[in-house]
Image (spheres, rainbow, N blue to C red):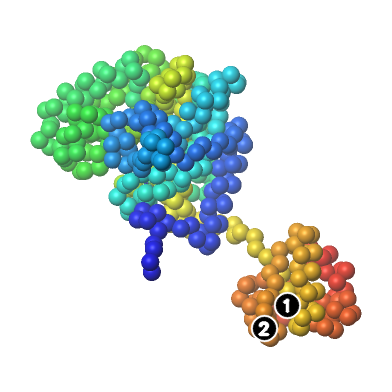
Amino acid sequence: MLYRAPRGTSDILPQEQAYWRYIEQKVAEIAELYGYERIDAPAFEDTKLFARSVGEDTDIVKKEMYTFEDRGGSLLTLRPEGTAPVCRAYLEHGMKNLPQPVKLYYIASIFRYERPQAGRYRQHYQFGYEAIGDDDPALDGEVIDMAWQFFLSVNLRSLSLQLNSIGCQKCRPNYVAALKGYYASHTQELCSDCKTRLKRNPLRLLDCKKPSCQMVADSAPRSIDFLCPECADHFSRLKRYLQLLDLPFVVNHHLVRGLGYYTRTVFEIQPEEGGAQSTLVGGGRYDDLIEELGGKPTPALGFAAGIERIILNLKKQKVAIPTLAKPRVFIAYLGDEAKEGAIKLASALRGAGIGVIEALGDKSLKAQLRQANNLDVRYAVIIGEQEIKAGTVILRDMTSAQQKSVPVSQLQGLLK
Ligand code: HAM
């Protein structure tokens, strides 16, 4: 074999497509229920858009972006996430003039140069929902509810909903200072990555997966104890609304998220059994991002979910998925004249919305019916010289093997 799909990427083969269709349909249904409209942004953007929004000190920007210079000398990056492009589009198309919040959703390929393993790829697909232009915690409640309802609608169970608030520009510096102070006296116990994080991105110390670092994190200061009165009120109202909605959230003081734009609410949904690469949904508020990208201060929030990981869990939980429709009629023929009749008939049936597979070549009737059997069609329509003359066809029920002669004029009605 000369070529394989690049490491960390994969082909989505026909037998997998039912899962993808299933999820895409649910994504669109949920969007409609909550009033979100679809947006599709380009697969690549100006590199600075991601550096600025996701943050220079994050793993994504430092290590994982597919960045290239095009032939015109522009520095571009394949999107490593979907929120920044939506915010860029919000600004570029003057969406601040629309009724707020503007609610948008997307289904998009995402590119991250990560170490591939089960559930972690270099190209994966996300769907995401973003609500831009309102800071009411009721909107946070609605967005989290939407994520939860999505999983109910696809029949995934045993999930956990984790929530935290990481404050705003005003109160976060106090928290980060307290965190640095705490970790300064525990540097010996930290892994080498965390020692670097301590200097550049101390919040990320909390979600290091190494057991020794987790032990240190367990006694670290908690962000919710440092919230300013406005953030504290926002968080407590959000929790109240989530209770009203009967959403079974748990506050996780280690939840900080890996992207730099978050403010206040952050949340994730994971399978209860957990595991490092298992997070299905990540999201939260990013109240400063639109301003950071050159707009007026505009609060916003959203979430995104990894489609491959959802499919892994659908399979693990053996969730039954609707199969995709395929042609249920096969047309067999004997002789050249009958072949011409078969070509015309197939076209007429398709025109009437009936899926058809035509026999090809000069195979024997037996071979053609074997093919029909392998294709798992419900009916075979057989045409010979005699049928052409008589204006009839033979209609064969592939399950019972019973067949009868039918006038061509009645065939459509019968098949429908
Ligand atoms: P994220 O947590 O980086 O958030 O990604 C969202 C989801 O994408 C993850 O929870 C996971 O299911 C999936 N995912 C991430 N990386 C990979 C990978 N390498 N392979 C397979 N699946 C992966 C964001 O990207 C934010 N833009 C979410 C957001 C939207 N926040 C606010 N609005």
Give the amino acid type for the residue marked by disc 1 in the picture.
Answer: Ala
- Furthest toward the left, the residue is 188
Q: Quadrant of residue 264?
A: top left
Tell me where residue 161 appears, x and y as whole percent. Answer: 41, 38
Could one spot residue 165 in this view of the protein? no
- Judging by the rendered image, the residue that carries numbered circle 1 is 332
Q: Is residue 191 above or below residue 379?
A: above
Q: Amino acid at mark 2?
A: Lys
Q: Is mark 1 within 8 Å of ligand 1?
A: no
Q: Would you say 96 lies left or right of 69 here? A: right
Q: Which mark is residue 363?
A: 2
Q: Locate the C terminus and report the quarter of the image it occupies.
A: bottom right
Numbered disc 1: secondary structure:
strand
Question: In front: 90, or 325?
Answer: 90
State the residue at coordinates (37%, 56%). 6
Local crowd size for mark 1, using a 10 Å CA cut-off: few (<14), some (14–19), many (≥20): many
Whether residue 308 is visible to the viewer of this picture, yes or no, is: yes
**Is 299 drawn above or below residue 388 in the view shown?**
above
